Amino acid sequence: MTETHHIEARGDSGADVARLLASRVLDVPDFPKPGIVFKDLMPLFADGPVFRQVIDGIVAHHGRGSFDAVVGIEARGFVVAAAIAYATGVGVVPVRKAGKLPRAAYSASYALEYGEATLEVHQDAFTAGHRVLVVDDVLATGGTAAATLDLVERAGGTVAGFTVLLELAALGGRQRLAPRPVHALLTV
């Protein structure tokens, strides 16, 4: 069963954007395993006008021309990254789960809040100095984000920014990524 609930709306792009995003988040208890409350953002992705406002807000925050490529983290980060890349006319690069990329790739393993995982990026994904905006849907413990930021740098990119739609503040991901700045549209 999914449920909606009132979320205090605060985020790095202001209360209006945070409220808009909060209105499209569904809690799914016990997914992917008992005790985890999954934050489902599919209602946001399905609402064209709201999704456009969110993407426009991310682009406005970072500024057009401040990045040369957008990295999306598998899998929901792909949706956000593709929309930002299209809106700004830059390329999109996927960071994928292990074994999904067809060419030579760098890999990084990390702990999740409910297990372990490995991510990969093509070794030739960026040219030296390529400014890269990294985006994902949710920031929890920061393991996925830290691994991705390291992969971008190992592949020759320069991290120009990191944005998430939803930050779960109690899990400490922002602190784990310090001193790198985190831009979260909604923090709960």
Image (spheres, grey):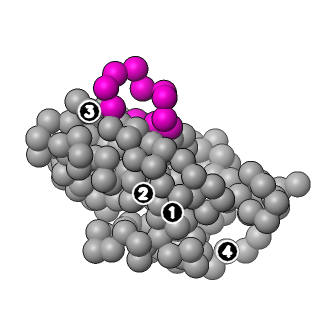
Residue that appears at 56% across and 74% down:
171
Residue 103 included in the magenta stretch of the image: yes
Whether residue 42 is in magenta: the answer is no
Picture layout, residue 149 above or below residue 80? below
| Quarter of the view holding residue 123 | top left
Circle 3 SS class: loop
The label shown at residue 139 is 1
Q: Is residue 112 left or right of residue 105?
A: right
**Of the residues shown, which amino acid type is indicated by label 4?**
Ile
Residue 102 place in picture, x, y as percent: 40, 20
Q: Are marks 2 and 1 in contact (CB under 8 Å)?
A: yes
Q: CA distance from mark 2 to mark 1?
A: 7 Å
x then y, percent, for residue 57? 40, 58
Q: Residues within 10 Å of mark 1 (few under 14, many from 20)?
A: many
Q: Nearer the viewer, mark 2 or mark 1?
A: 2
Name the spot of residue 79 as percent of width and height, x first. 50, 39
Residue bearing the label numbered 4: 7
Question: What is the magenta range?
Answer: 93-105
Q: What residue sits 41% from the left and 77% below the top?
A: 175
Tell me, yes or no, whether the two marked residues, 1 and 4, touch with CB atoms within 8 Å. Answer: no
